[in-house]
Each structure stands twice: as structure tokens, then as C-alpha cells.
Amino acid sequence: MTLESVQYKLQDHVAIIRIDDGKRNALSPEVLKQIYQALDRAESDQASVILTGRESVFSAGFDLHVMKRGGMNALRMLRLGYALTARVMAYPYPVIAACNGHAFAMGVFLMLSADYVIGSRGDFKIAANEVAIGLTMPRVAAATLRHRLNPAAFQRAVTLSEYFKVDSALSVGFFDELVEPNELMSRAKTHAEDFKKLDPHAHTASKRRIRASLIRKIRYSIPLDILDAALMGLRGTKPR
């Protein structure tokens, strides 16, 4: 199945969902809807998921052009993106994020929602750069970062918009492992095969049990973050 910027490929109960807009993999409303459609299809296929991007970039975050225009379309984009974190965290089969390169803002939060994250070696940066561009860190984003990062790195990522190189990103918790770029997808597929040995019911119940409080917090925070964005828009701020 090909859905414009999102491709879906199923093989032996492993679904590869690839985001590729030919540029920076901006998460526009349409791209986000396509990711939801791909996840729905994967769940219907009872498939584990490998979520990946294009060469040198996983995702640069929300679509800046949509954000600059503001209005309801921008707010809908934020709602879709924030809710996607909970969708991935609660997905009933294993989810592997295979990060091809740069990941910023919402791209980071999507990546960190997976069960296992593999990074690609190279001159790439990982950053939740909201504060650097004049935004108070959204509650959903902060909760997602806290879920994965060690405490000191969490503080730096949120308050200082630190840009992490891949080796430091591994050490602080953005990645579970790093591989060479040409090994990224083969490694992800190997893990997907290994995870098939897990009892599927126990996997689903366990992940939802330990993430129940986090998922509730995310869902509670979404309308608050949307309200913040709407108020900033009224004041003329251009959030990303």
C-alpha cells in the first residue's frame, strides 16, 4: 500500500511504515492521518511495526508551513500529533522505531513512543527544540521525554533545547542501540522477528499496565496543550 508520503509494506506479520515526503518528513495533517491509517491496517493485520523515515532524516517535526498559517488546521495537526504518541504507546504489538538520521520536536516524540528505538550512526542531531524557538514545552512532549530520558538529560532537553549527537543520544536514552546506516533496517527486522517469540497477550497487557498513568496524562494534557497553542496564536506567536 502506498499512501503518498507514508508507505506500508507487510511481510510475515511485520509491517514497515515508512515516512518519506522527499524532504524533511514534516508531520503535516495529511501525513499524520496517513500514519494513523497505516497503524490501523497493521493492527488489523496483527503485525508488529517498524516505523522509519527516509535517508538521513526520521522527521523534523510538525509542518512549519501549516503552523505559520495558524487557524484550525494547525490546531488539528497538533491534536493529531500529540494523540499519536498515546496511539503508538498502546499499540498491541511490538513497535520498533528505526531512526535514519535527524529527529526534531514531534519527530522525537513519535520516535520515543515506540517500544524499542534503533539509531543510525552519522552526523545527525536529536533535539526537542521547542524552547529554542520560543515555545513552552508542551505537556505531552515533556511526558514523552520523561518516559525515556535519564533525569539530567531530561532537564537539559526540555529547558535548554540541547541538541544531542547520536552517541550522547544513545547514552541518555533516546536510543536503545546504534548501528551503521546500512544495517538499520536489517537490525530492525531481526528484532521484529525476535519479538515474535513474546506472548502477544502478555506483551500487550504489560505495556499498557506500566504505561497506563502516562497514557492518561497524555490524553488529559492534549486539550490543555491545544488551548495553549490557540492562545499563543491569538497573541501572534508562531509555534512549531
Image: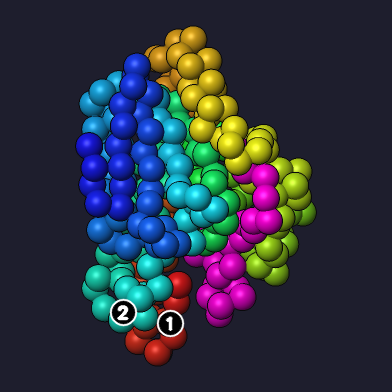
Amino acid at circle 2: Gly
Q: Is residue 177 above or below residue 142?
A: above
The answer to whether 118 appears left or right of 178 in the picture is left
Q: Residue at x 68, y 56 (%)?
A: 123
Q: Residues within 10 Å of mark 1 (few under 14, many from 20)?
A: some
Q: CA distance from mark 2 to mark 1?
A: 8 Å
Residue 63: x percent and y percent? Answer: 38, 68
- Color scheme of the displayed model: rainbow
Q: Are marks 2 and 1 in contact (CB under 8 Å)?
A: yes
Residue 78: x percent and y percent? Answer: 36, 63
Q: Earlier in the sequence, mark 2 or mark 1?
A: 2
Examine the rendering and report whether any part of residue 133 can be seen: yes
**Residue that numbered label 2 is attached to:** 70
Q: Residue at x 54, y 53 (%)?
A: 56
Q: Residue at x 59, y 68 (%)?
A: 129
Depth order, front residue of 226/122: 122
**Residue that numbered label 1 is attached to:** 238
Rendering quarter of residue 76: bottom left
Residue 164 is covered by the magenta coloring? no
Amino acid at circle 1: Lys
Depth order, front residue of 92/54: 54
